[in-house]
Image (cartoon, helix red, strand yellow):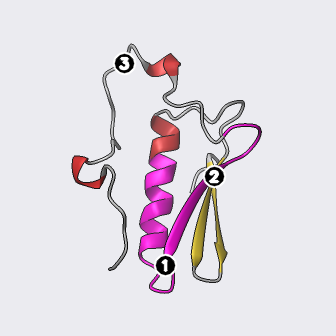
Amino acid sequence: MNNKVCIEREAEIGLICLDNPPVNAIGVALRAAIHEALSELLLEKHINAIVLYGTGRFFSAGADIKEFARTAEQPTLPRHLLGRQFVAR
């Protein structure tokens, strides 16, 4: 796991903390870290919910504008996951 996120567990809840100061801008490195953290937590049978939160004053300012001129890199959010709630496994 890289240092852009931290993973915590509270009973049946997995917590993913975004830690990309100053505004938790979501670029390639943070997307990769979120993907890795989600993959890890989804493998744990006792985890029933996953919560993302950010350090500092912001959850996230959104996309990293420093990367706007670049072609999109993996990992990108697959279309089938957009707006989906994970209720059952």
Residue at the image position 49 percent from the left and 78 percent from the top? 48
Please, is residue 56 above or below residue 86 in the view? Answer: above
Q: Which residue is mark 1?
A: 48
The residue to which callout 2 is attached is: 53
* Circle 2 SS class: strand
- Please check the rendered image and state whether residue 44 is part of the magenta-colored stretch, yes or no: yes
Q: Is residue 30 above or below residue 84?
A: above
Residue type marked 3 = Arg
Question: Identity of the amino acid at label 1?
Answer: Asn
Badge 2 density bin: few <14, some 14–19, many ≥20, Cα 10 Å: some
The quadrant in which residue 24 appears is: top right
* Dot 2 or dot 1, earlier in sequence: 1
Which residue, given by chain and number where applicable, does mark 3 sit on? 70
Task: Give whichever of 3, 49 is nearer the camera.
Answer: 49
Q: Which residues are magenta?
A: 32-58
- Measured in 3D between alpha carbons, the distance from the residue under mark 1 to the one under mark 3, in whole angstroms, is 36 Å
Residue type (three-letter) at the residue carrying disc 2: Tyr
